[in-house]
């Protein structure tokens, strides 16, 4: 079985495929000053199985196009939207977040939690900007250095995993350079990583390994996930997810 298929199987039954939380999504909605009474058109990019999508739909009067490149995740979102009686406002689509067929000025809001790193922060904010209406809101969470200096071990780890990791001040300058006016920022708290993402994932490890008869590929994937969890526990003072909120300038 391909590694991607294993990765999908390990993650698809969890509520989240990355750090985050409903309260944090609601905080971002509040900081973005989104009008809960006015109809909004939102693109939720890299939505996974839709934890943020469902929260947006519950909190706002919104028509949401939710995009992820994995059909398995999109199908789960579609089922969850039906179960929650939200299918009339959530429109799941299989697609790549760096190859979107949207119209210019189509959206009031572009939302993306924990997914922009797949194409790179700078590329993402530039690619997505044309799809926003003037003064439209961009809300994205992005892996971020929390300190200016850090141990060499964690610096080397993230240089290998995602060289675009940087401090919030650098990310905010990139937003300004790309034609946005940043006006909100906060860091996801520890429980968004541990309670909402890593601990539920850990609970899947034994059943996952049994299902694949402890194959080398399955064991390698679980070991990689365990390493990632250990890295966070050891170095969480130095990095986290920053949530960035900005408006599109004319």
Image (cartoon, grey):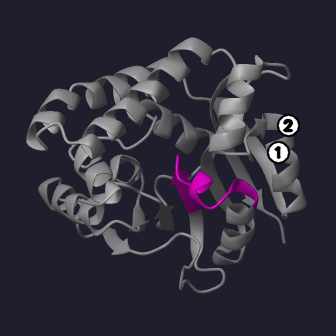
In percent of the image, x 29 and y 45: which residue is there?
217
Q: Nearer the viewer, residue 27 or 178?
A: 178
Report the disc number at residue 172. 1
In percent of the image, x 88 and y 48: which residue is there?
173
Q: Residues within 10 Å of mark 1 (few under 14, many from 20)?
A: many
Instruction: Classify residue 109 as left or right of residue 120.
Output: left
Secondary structure of the residue carrying tag 2 is: helix
Asked if the residue under mark 2 is in contact with the one under mark 1, i.e. CB atoms within 8 Å, the reply is yes
Q: Nearer the viewer, residue 10 or 171?
A: 10
Q: Is residue 137 above or below residue 220?
A: below
Report the disc number at residue 169. 2
Instruction: Classify residue 221 as left or right of residue 45.
Output: left
In percent of the image, x 9 and y 41: which residue is there?
211
User: Residue 114 in magenta?
Assistant: yes
Q: Quadrant of the C terminus?
A: bottom right
Magenta stretch bounds = 110-122
């Amino acid at each position: 079985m391909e590694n991607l298929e294993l990765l999908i199987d390990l993650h698809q039954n969890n509520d989240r495929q990355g750090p985050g939380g409903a309260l944090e999504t609601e905080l971002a909605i509040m900081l973005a000053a989104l009008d809960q009474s006015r109809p909004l058109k939102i693109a939720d990019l890299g939505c996974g199985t839709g934890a943020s999508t469902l929260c947006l739909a519950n909190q706002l009067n919104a028509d949401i196009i939710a995009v992820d490149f994995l059909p398995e995740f999109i199908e789960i979102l579609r089922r969850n939207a039906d179960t929650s009686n939200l299918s009339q406002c959530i429109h799941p689509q299989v697609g790549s977040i760096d190859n979107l067929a949207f119209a210019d000025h189509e959206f009031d809001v572009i939302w993306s939690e924990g997914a922009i790193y797949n194409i790179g922060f700078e590329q993402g904010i530039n690619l997505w900007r044309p799809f926003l209406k003037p003064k439209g809101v961009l809300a994205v969470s992005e892996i971020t250095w929390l300190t200016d200096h850090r141990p060499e071990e964690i610096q080397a780890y993230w240089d290998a995993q995602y060289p675009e990791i940087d401090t919030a001040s650098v990310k905010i300058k990139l937003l300004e350079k790309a034609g946005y006016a940043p006006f909100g920022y906060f860091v996801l708290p520890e429980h968004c990583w541990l309670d909402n993402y890593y601990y539920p994932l850990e609970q899947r490890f034994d059943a996952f390994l049994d299902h694949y008869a402890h194959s080398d590929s399955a064991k390698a994937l679980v070991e990689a996930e365990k390493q990632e969890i250990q890295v966070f526990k050891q170095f969480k003072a130095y990095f986290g997810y920053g949530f960035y909120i900005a408006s599109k300038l004319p």
